[in-house]
Image (cartoon, rainbow, N blue to C red):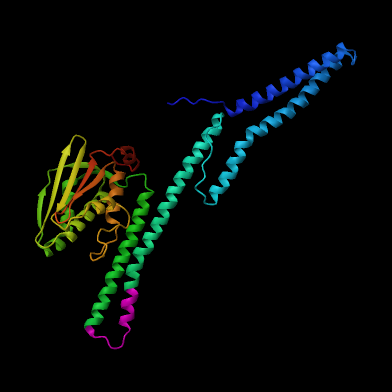
């Protein structure tokens, strides 16, 4: 542990008070003694003591008050700076060069708090901007097609088309809101809900079976290498990782392509690699692919919420693992999820009542 050097605040007050009183008493004693020697004062001996004590007390208190006022100056600054922070000014930075230990600690803690609040505020603004933009698209589509449905001369085929478009936009909006709420809950989550041991290879097979109508419709080939592996974690959250990765692989792989899944193990770790022969992505897209609301397909020709990979990353982080992507335009993509067989947050699993 780093050694903290500096004066304790309580020691400062005691030292100031004692020093000021001692100095005042000494000065008054010298003055009084000189007055007695010169014959200017001739009171009884006990009156000399009382005079010195009272004079030392009052003058020492006065000097202490002046000194303490100086010591308390940083705390008045902290009060003013805290008030500005409360009003939303996160550019404040406190001076950390005080000789008093507590003052330096308070200044450092305030600076750390302000930096964190500034980061949270930036994320909040970006999140609101992203949500506003993404919600506007399906809402605009719903409104537009609803207006068209009200036209008196539309055909039955157009009516069916517009109704289907409204349904699709409504479902997309519903998925987006659900994903936003889920991601928000995970951002504030410090535990792994439903943490237990489960079969990872079987979970991957089940996810592919659930998506069978989608990959069979595109005549995609599955290349699986799934040795038996058991790991401990949140089974439900892990399922969402694979559902998102498989959905993206199916979405961006052309008809007749291949989706490959590999499980590899090393001491204490398991890695799941899901690759496709799809359109791939450039390096700039890969840098942002795990950010909220980011979609590499700027045209939105393939509908999505832009939250699936952000969810996958958050879930992986909660397990103490990592997720990465390797891709190139026209060469497909490979997502690798590395998870601990026993999560680093094992103690959090214990809180759920399971091991």
Point 75% across, 17% down: residue: 26
**Residue 50 location, x and y as percent?**
83, 19
**Residue 301 location, x and y as percent?**
23, 66
Q: Is residue 138 left or right of residue 207?
A: right
Q: Main secondary structure of the magenta part?
A: helix
Q: Is residue 226 above or below residue 166?
A: above
Residue 9 falls inside the magenta stretch: no
In this rendering, the count of numbered labels is 0
Q: Is residue 21 left or right of residue 191?
A: right
**Residue 290 location, x and y as percent?**
28, 51
Point 19% across, 61% down: residue: 251
Which residue, as the protein is rendered here, is positioned at the far bottom? Answer: 153
Residue 154 falls inside the magenta stretch: yes
Front residue of 53 and 269: 53
**Residue 15 location, x and y as percent?**
64, 23
The part of the image, by quadrant, that contains residue 215 is: bottom left
Looking at the rendering, in which quadrant would you find the N terminus?
A: top left
Point 29% across, 70% down: residue: 169
Point 72% across, 20% down: residue: 23
The part of the image, by quadrant, that contains residue 180 is: bottom left
Front residue of 254 and 207: 254
The part of the image, by quadrant, that contains residue 131 is: bottom left
- Which stretch did the figure color magenta? 142-156
Looking at the rendering, in which quadrant would you find the C terminus?
A: top left
């Amino acid at each position: 542990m780093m050694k903290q050097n500096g004066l304790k605040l309580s020691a400062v007050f005691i030292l100031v008070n004692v020093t000021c009183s001692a100095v005042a008493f000494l000065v008054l004693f010298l003055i009084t003694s000189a007055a007695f020697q010169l014959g200017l004062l001739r009171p009884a001996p006990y009156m000399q003591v009382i005079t010195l004590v009272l004079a030392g007390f009052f003058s020492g208190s006065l000097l202490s008050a002046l000194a303490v006022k100086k010591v308390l100056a940083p705390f008045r600054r902290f009060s003013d700076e805290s008030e500005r922070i409360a009003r939303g000014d996160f550019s404040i930075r406190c001076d950390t060069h005080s000789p008093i230990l507590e003052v330096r600690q308070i200044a450092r803690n305030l600076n750390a708090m302000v930096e964190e609040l500034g980061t949270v505020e930036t994320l909040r603004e970006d999140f609101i901007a992203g949500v506003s933009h993404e919600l506007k698209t399906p809402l605009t589509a719903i409104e537009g097609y609803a207006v068209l449905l009200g036209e008196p001369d539309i055909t039955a085929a157009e009516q069916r088309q517009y109704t289907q478009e409204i349904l699709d936009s409504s479902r997309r909006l519903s998925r987006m809101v659900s994903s936003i709420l889920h991601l928000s809950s995970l951002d504030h989550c410090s535990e792994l809900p439903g943490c237990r041991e489960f079969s990872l290879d079987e979970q991957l097979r089940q996810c592919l079976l659930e998506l069978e109508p989608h990959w069979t419709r595109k005549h995609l080939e599955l290349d699986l290498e799934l040795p038996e592996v058991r790991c401990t974690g949140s089974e439900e959250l892990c399922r969402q990782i694979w559902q998102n990765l498989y959905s993206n692989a199916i979405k961006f792989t052309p008809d007749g392509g291949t989706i490959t899944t590999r499980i590899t193990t090393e001491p204490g770790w398991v890695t799941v690699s899901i690759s496709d022969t799809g359109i791939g992505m450039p390096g700039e897209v890969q840098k942002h692919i795990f950010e909220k609301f980011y979609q590499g397909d700027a045209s939105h020709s393939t509908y999505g919420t832009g939250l699936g990979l952000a969810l996958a990353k958050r879930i992986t982080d909660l397990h103490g693992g990592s997720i990465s992507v390797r891709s190139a335009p026209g060469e497909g993509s490979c997502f690798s999820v590395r998870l601990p067989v026993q999560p680093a947050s094992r103690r959090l699993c214990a809180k759920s009542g399971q091991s």
